[in-house]
Each structure stands twice: as C-alpha cells, then as structure tokens.
Image (tube, rainbow, N blue to C red):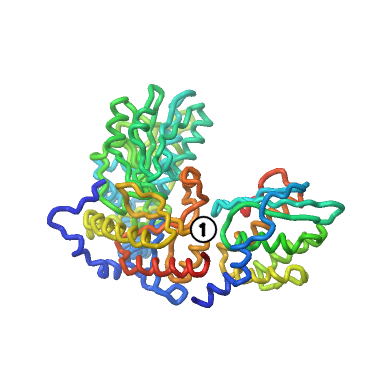
C-alpha cells in the first residue's frame, strides 16, 4: 500500500472544508457540541453523491437485474454492472469476471472458506496472523472443525508489527492458504502484503487479503499486490452497508465450486443436472443488493475524484498529528505503534475504562469506538480488555483531533 | 463540566468506582458465578456465603468500567445480611430502575438510585446490570458463565 506523498502534489493543498461540505451527516451538534466523527474504522460516512445515487436508483430505475427484457430491468442491470466495472478499475483487477459482489468482507471470506475450503483435508494448514479481525479467524476455525485442518497463527510484536520472518517460517508443506489483513482494524498496522504473497507463491500457497480497513485510506492494486483473493466492504469506504466485494483471480474462481445455490448462479437446471453460470455470477446466487452495489460504485467514483493518493497523503499527516497529540497527555498508553500505519490509533488513558472514556467523549460530541474491536486475541496479547480507538477519514480535521484531546482532559478530570 | 455527565457519573458512583467495597475473592463463599459482558469484554465474579436463605457475606472480583464497578460495589454493600428473597426483589427493582423511571422502593437500595440516569445511555445499561445478572446466576447456582446478552 502506497502512503508516500506523490510527487508534485502538496498534501497541504488538500481542501478538507470543501470535502466536508459533501458529507451532510458531519454538520450536526451532539450534546450541544459539534460532532467530531472519529469512528470511521467501524463505518465511514456517506457523501451526497452516494445518497443521491441510491435515491435515484430507487426513484427511477429499480427492477431485477439480468432478468427482464423491459427498460427498467435493462437500466438496473447497466447500473449494477457499471458498479462492478468501477470496482474492477478501483482495485486494478484484470476483469470484471474477478469481481464478486457479497454482503461484505465477512461474507467474502466465508465464501472462500466454504468454496476453497471444500478441497481441504485433515492436517492441511491455514496460516493467519495474530492481528486478524474475528471475521478472518472464525471462518477458518469453522473450516478446521469441518475438515480437520489446522489453524496456525503468525506472531506480532509489542508495537503491533507482524513478525514477517516468523510468519514465513510457518509456511510449511501442509500450508494451503495464507489469510492476512492488509490493515489492522485495532492497531492500524499496514502489513507487507507483497512480501507475504511473494514468499507464499514461491511455495505454491495462495493468499487471501482482508482489505476492509485498507480501501478508504490509500490506493489498492490487487495485481501489484499479487494476492489471489482480496475482500472488502462498501461501508468502510463511504458506500452502503450490506455490500462488499470478493476479488478472486480468475483461474481460482474458475476452479472453485459455487458456495450458495439458487437463481442467477445457473445456466440451466433440471432435476438430473445443473450447469453453473459463468463468472462472476457462479458466486452470486439470488437477487443481489443492487442498490448497494450502485451506492458502492458512486462511492468509488467520489473517492477517485478526490484522489486516493491525495487522501493517503492528507491522512498520514492527520494520523501523525493525532498520535503526537495523544502522546502529550499524562498517563497515555498508545496501543499499536508500528512504523507503517493507516487510519487508526488505539489507546488507554490511565486506569480509565474505555467505555467510560467513550461516554464522556460522546458528551463532548466526539464519536470513537471502545471495546475489543472484534479482535479479542489482540487484546489478550496486550493483556487488556479493550481500548479506545480513534479512527480517521479524509474528511476529519486537526480541529476535531483537538476536540478529542480536550474531551480526554475532561474525562481525566472527572474519572482519574 | 456538562450537567449530563454529572448526572451519570454522580459523586456516589465515582466514589464507589474509585474505592470499591467488598472486592476480592470470598474464602467462605458457597455460591459463585462468573458474569461476562461481551460488548466490552468485562468479566466479574460474584461470591456469596449463603446459609438458610440469608446472604451472610457477599463480594465481587474483576475489573470493569466505573459504572459496572460502582454497581457491583453498591450491590454488595446493600445486600449483606439480607435474605435471598430480598436479593431477588432487589434485582427486579434495579432492572425496573434501569428500564423505566421507577426508583427502588426497598430502603436498603437507596444508594443504588445514584445509577438511575444510566437509563439514558442504552449502551451502558448492561454495565450497570452486569453485577446483578451475575448475582442472579449465583443465586440460581449457575454452572455456566452468565452474559449480559
């Protein structure tokens, strides 16, 4: 993932106030204070362009896709497939046959666990990392229960950095898949996906990447990464909930069996034999989330207009400011201090429980996430029940970071 | 300081959370249960020494947010020496206080009314009820851990 400032572009020229005008939800008061929305890693907000695209679809174009000969069905199909092309372009995939719409990252990973997983045997190994979200742990545990395969977990250090050498040493003759997150949702760590893919491919092992926390923060190019599968969610990147994507390399998707049966995923059905549809429809049983896909397409168009490299440069500055301001506070413990990070800073403040911090901050208009962030093994490693987590997007400002810092002082005065 | 915050984090709540009473393992306990709030990962154990339908001693152990610790601390303070039947009535009264605007009528629960405004924070009600759900589990001789879900 590239986070360098692109040559010739000055991140300070990024006009955040103009960007904020595109997001209606940001302009409100919470408990009498201006809203500072710093919970973007849980779900990002929506620009007017996305809301309008969904509204326009429902007002003018809704019909089922790939079904009817009538005008509205044609329009809906064009819009839905247009969104698929936007996704393809956005992640640099070679073909829309490699873009499967799912409900989200979780469903995309479960799809691979079910489909790819059907070829596993007892004693085969799945290699993940210690910083995975539950959605990149539990589907593999279920698969291991079904097949007798073994889940192996690569370690991370106290900064939240993946121990790459240790991980690569865990690649064995029995490793069938590596499943690793691009960006950690709890720690913010950006993992060296290309190095992992290179080493895994040398041993003939495919790699699945959980990209849920990556796609909002910097350009992603699946061909450059070289991964075999890349899963991500619409709502983490200014698109709707209930829509996500599984990118799968075409040779893999061709070989893998379908995972759900129904309409759309077939070419012909009789009671003796069914012929599956071509890619990507083989993996899209039933009427899809058409409006969700259209909304995601609109989000991608919007992000591309702003420029992912511009976004990355601005966010890196803001994240550095956030981290340095947090570090100034007495009793601050930063959780997740890897050299290469994106979007997220977890922390603990003295003995104050993260939930109390969350409530006090809410009173000051500041929205953050508190708890285990669906990454309980990370919390266990750090021997903490949870953290407070501030997570930024390109529409956040230094002023909002200051508001967070002031609110943390209020929490300290009240609770410490 | 905004008024709303002081309504939730009343002095009595803060005092109990910073200096919790009856915290630690109870050696003489003949009933205990482990409570778990999956939302925040907090775990709390309630210990009871119960004979002939009376709670002779009660304690809790574990860590949590200010609201869950204060609730557990006030609960153990309030219930020592009371009957199991009274403890069950107390659980119902605390539930009522945190779901509708009904202050406890039992005199020994007076302190607990300091938690009444937690009701305005639906995501925090489970923090306040964790100790009470766990107490219920201990009274029921729970063999499995209790959750707030």
Q: Is residue A76 left or right of residue A5?
A: right
Residues packed near mark 1 inside 10 Å, few (<14), some (14 to 19) or many (20 plus):
few
- Of A314 and A135, nearer the camera is A314
Q: Is residue A135 left or right of residue A306?
A: right
Residue A205: name its quadrant.
top left
Relative placement, left or right, of A141 versus A213 is: right
Q: Nearer the viewer, residue A148 or A318?
A: A318
Q: Position of residue B143 (x, y in %)?
A: 72, 43
Which secondary structure, mark 1? loop
Count the marks: 1
Q: Mark 1 falls within which chain?
A: A
In the rendered image, is residue A227 in sight? yes
Image position, residue A83 (x, y; %)? 30, 52
Q: Quadrant of residue A318?
A: bottom left
Determine if residue A66 is in view. Answer: no
Specify the quadrant of the image occupied by residue A38.
Answer: bottom left
Which residue shows up at 42% across the image and 61% down it? Answer: A330
Decide which of A33, A324 is in the foreground and name it.
A324
What is the x, y in percent for residue B40? 54, 54
**Residue drawn at point x = 38 percent, y = 24 percent:** A172
Q: Find disc 1 in the rendering and name its residue.
A: A351
Q: Is the residue A204 above or below the residue A142 in the image?
A: above
Against A217, residue B96 (above or below) is below
Residue in the picture at 44% in, 45% down: A133
- Report the residue that reaches farthest toward the top: A173
Question: Outermost residue toward the right?
Answer: B52
Residue at the left extreme, as displayed: A8
| Residue A221 location (% of width, % of height) | 25, 44
Q: Is residue B110 above or below residue B20?
A: below
User: Residue at position x 48%, y 67% from top?
Assistant: A411
């Amino acid at each position: 993932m590239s986070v360098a400032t692109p040559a010739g572009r000055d991140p300070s020229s990024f006009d955040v106030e103009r960007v904020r005008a595109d997001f209606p939800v940001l302009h409100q008061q919470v408990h009498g204070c201006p809203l500072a929305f710093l919970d973007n890693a849980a779900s990002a907000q929506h620009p007017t362009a996305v809301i309008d695209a969904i509204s326009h679809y429902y007002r003018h174009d809704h019909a089922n896709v790939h079904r009817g000969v009538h005008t509205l069905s044609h329009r809906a199909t064009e819009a839905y497939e247009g969104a698929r092309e936007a996704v393809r372009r956005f992640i640099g995939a070679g073909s829309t046959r490699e873009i499967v719409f799912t409900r989200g990252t979780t469903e995309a990973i479960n799809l691979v666990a079910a489909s790819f997983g059907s070829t596993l045997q007892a004693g085969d190994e799945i290699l993940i990392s210690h910083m995975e979200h539950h959605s990149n742990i539990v589907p593999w545990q279920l698969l291991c229960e079904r097949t007798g395969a073994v889940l192996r977990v690569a370690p991370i250090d106290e900064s939240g950095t993946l121990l790459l050498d240790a991980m690569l040493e865990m690649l064995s003759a029995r490793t069938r898949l590596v499943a690793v997150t691009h960006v950690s949702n709890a720690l913010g760590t950006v993992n060296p996906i290309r190095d992992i893919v290179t080493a895994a491919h040398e041993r003939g092992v495919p790699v699945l990447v959980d990209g849920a926390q990556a796609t909002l923060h910097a350009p992603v190019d699946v061909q450059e990464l070289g991964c075999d599968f890349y899963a991500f969610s619409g709502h983490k990147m200014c698109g709707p909930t209930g829509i996500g994507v599984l990118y799968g390399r075409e040779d893999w998707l061709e070989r893998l069996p379908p995972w759900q049966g129904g309409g759309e995923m077939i070419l012909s059905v009789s009671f003796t034999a069914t012929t599956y549809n071509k890619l990507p429809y083989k993996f899209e049983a039933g009427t899809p989330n058409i409006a969700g896909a259209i909304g995601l397409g609109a989000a991608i168009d919007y992000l591309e207009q702003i420029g992912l490299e511009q976004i990355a440069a601005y966010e890196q500055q803001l994240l550095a400011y956030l981290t340095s301001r947090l570090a100034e506070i007495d009793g601050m413990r930063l959780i997740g201090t890897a050299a290469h990070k994106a979007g997220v800073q977890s922390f603990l403040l003295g003995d104050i429980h993260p939930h109390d911090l969350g409530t006090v901050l809410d009173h000051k208009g500041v929205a953050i996430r508190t708890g285990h962030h669906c990454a309980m093994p990370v919390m266990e490693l750090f021997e903490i029940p949870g953290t407070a987590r501030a997570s930024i997007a390109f529409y956040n400002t230094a002023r909002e970071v200051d508001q967070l810092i002031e609110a943390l002082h209020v929490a300290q005065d009240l609770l410490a | 300081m905004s008024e709303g915050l002081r309504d939730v984090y009343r002095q009595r709540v803060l005092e109990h959370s910073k200096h919790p009473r009856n915290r630690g393992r109870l050696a003489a306990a003949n009933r205990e249960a482990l409570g778990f709030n999956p939302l925040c990962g907090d775990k709390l154990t309630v210990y009871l020494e119960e004979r002939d339908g009376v709670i002779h001693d009660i304690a809790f152990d574990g860590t949590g947010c200010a609201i869950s610790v204060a609730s557990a601390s006030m609960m153990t303070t309030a219930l020592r020496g009371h009957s199991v039947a009274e403890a069950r009535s107390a659980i119902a009264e605390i539930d009522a206080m945190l779901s509708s605007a009904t202050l406890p009528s039992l005199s020994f629960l007076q302190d607990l009314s300091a938690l009444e405004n937690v009701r305005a924070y639906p995501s925090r009600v489970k923090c306040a009820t964790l100790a009470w759900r766990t107490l219920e589990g201990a009274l029921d001789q729970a063999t499995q851990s209790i959750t707030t879900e």
